[in-house]
Image (tube, helix red, strand yellow):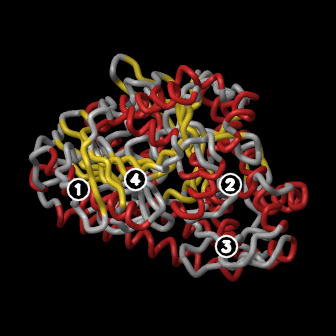
Amino acid sequence: MSASFPRVVLGLCAFTHDSAAALIVDGHLVGFVEEERLSGLKHDRGFPEHAVGWLLDSQGLTADDVDEVAYNFVPHRYLPAALASIKHFAGGPSVARVLPRARSFVKVATRTRRRLGQLRRRFPRARVRAVPHHLAHGLYAFAASGQDEAGVLVVDSLGETDTTTLAAAQRSEGRVRYQQLAALADPTSLGYVYGAITEHLGWRRGDEEGTVMALAALGDPARFRAVLTEAVPLTEQGFTVDPRLIALRVLSGRARRLTDRFVQRTCPPRCGDEPVTAVHTDLAAALQERTEQVMLHLARRAQQHAGAPALCLGGGVAMNCVSVGRIAEAGLAEEVTVPPAPGDSGTAIGAALAAWKDHTGRLATGVAGACYLGPDFGDVALTATHRPGMRAHRLDNRARYVAEQLAAGAIVGVFTGALEAGPRALGHRSILASPLDAAVIDRLNRTVKYREPFRPFAPVVLEDKAADFFDLWQASPFMSMAVGVTEQARERIPSIVHANGTARVQTVHADQNPFLAAVLAEFAALTGIPVLINTSLNIKGKPICGTPDMALDCLAESGIDALLLENWWVVRQ
């Protein structure tokens, strides 16, 4: 390996939730995949064995060919939080948590250093580099945007000790400059607050925040507005968190995150199998309202600091598509972008980008606008009776055939092309359905997704027809923002309109996804509507299907009517 110019850079998010790997070869991103899509274990927390194996095999490489491994956490950056814990000894509600908090951050720093040692043993010929977590988020958000100049706002639960960072990024004559302008540190964490209340409301923290975002549309934020305003007050620097309501963070899954005072002023914790009542919807509504206010405030600060025409968002809170829609609607920037994998899995790409930039001063190519970066299984070899209880036949004009089935009311799973990045179905691993039949929505919830009936289904639309149905100011290829709908959408396809009058829309054009664009065009020719429901190819509790066998399992275990597996039409007998 050259000391100054690595040819093969492997980026990793490993040993934590949403394990993933990315590979840069000769300055080009050649692939990225989340481990859960290949292992079948949702939010897989292990080393991304399958992902790394596929990436190296796809390029004819072995572990010995890797020149540099870039990991998405830096051990020593956890230690300032341990030292800063001392200030809470001064009194107040957090005294009892000071020592457990300090010990927990030291423990995670030690564990992270040990994980870097594991990586060195796995890749003995490579240099192993630790990359600051928010730098990985931010570089990926900027590179994916394709912009030459942008403000970058990263908001998550915790990246070492950072929770919120503002940066300015510029690219000129191939070289890139990324400058962090401001940062907020734990315990000031919007992601922590959202996760804590998600758990309090009976859903899984770190997994089902989107369910709470959907629930919020059914509630009245006024009931708990004062509590959330006190819990997360705005400041000139951004915001802070009141420890009298939100417990000081201890890095342990067993540590309480909300105080007795918060519970007394809101509601008791809800068990997951208990009915959802007005008190739960109202708390969700107040949480979501405050989140949008804080995110809009932070976005304004980011644009004031950076003074750039575009704003790039990253971090787990950037998956709150209603907040992103509010930021876009406010007109703070000419364009607001979110990468397809804004959460921690995407930091595998960001870490690799950081390593490449350090050596060359440049961003790797192949990142801008890219989401179909995972395994492509080509022309899958099936037989008419590939699995017991299923029958399959090959299609000639698959886009036309799928559109006809959708127009007739079928719910169709789609597995085609390269696996997409990120948590949302973007047309290669999707379940498609017609938005014209309310009964289809009921079937999707009851027999396919097995999820709460208040959760909306996202629409996908031909990009040049989007303005007919959605109040959209820019393309939205990655389902990043919830936007308002037009009167035509309310009248003709009310099934895709959420209770708050928005839809989390995906726009598609033929260059981006030829097959999905063709299906939409054929469906429009049959029905007059260039819009479909698009949800991920999985059932509740399982990851998006990354392999043909996982897709066939989904057909067997759910109520979808058929599966398009590349050129094969598969149905249950």
Tell me if 14 is positioned left or right of 394 in this view.
right
Could you say whether the residue bearing mark 2 is in a helix, strand or loop?
Answer: helix
Report how far apart the C-alphas of labels 4 and 1 lie in the structure. 32 Å
Q: What residue sits right under mark 4 in the picture? A: 562
Image quarter for residue 63?
A: bottom left
> Which residue is rendered at x = 25% and y = 34% of the image?
28
Image spot of residue 472 (x, y percent): 64, 27
Point out the frontmost of discs 2 and 1. Answer: 2
- The correct choice, above or below, for 446 with respect to 330 in the image is below
Image spot of residue 9 (x, y percent): 23, 45
Q: What residue sits right under mark 3 in the picture? A: 202
Report how far apart the C-alphas of labels 2 and 1 lie in the structure. 33 Å
Q: Is residue 323 visible?
A: no
Q: What residue sits right under mark 1 in the picture? A: 52
| Residue 322 or residue 134, whichever sits in front | 322
Q: Quadrant of the N terminus?
A: top left
Could you say whether the residue bearing mark 3 is in a helix, strand or loop?
Answer: loop
Point out the frontmost of discs 1 and 3. Answer: 3
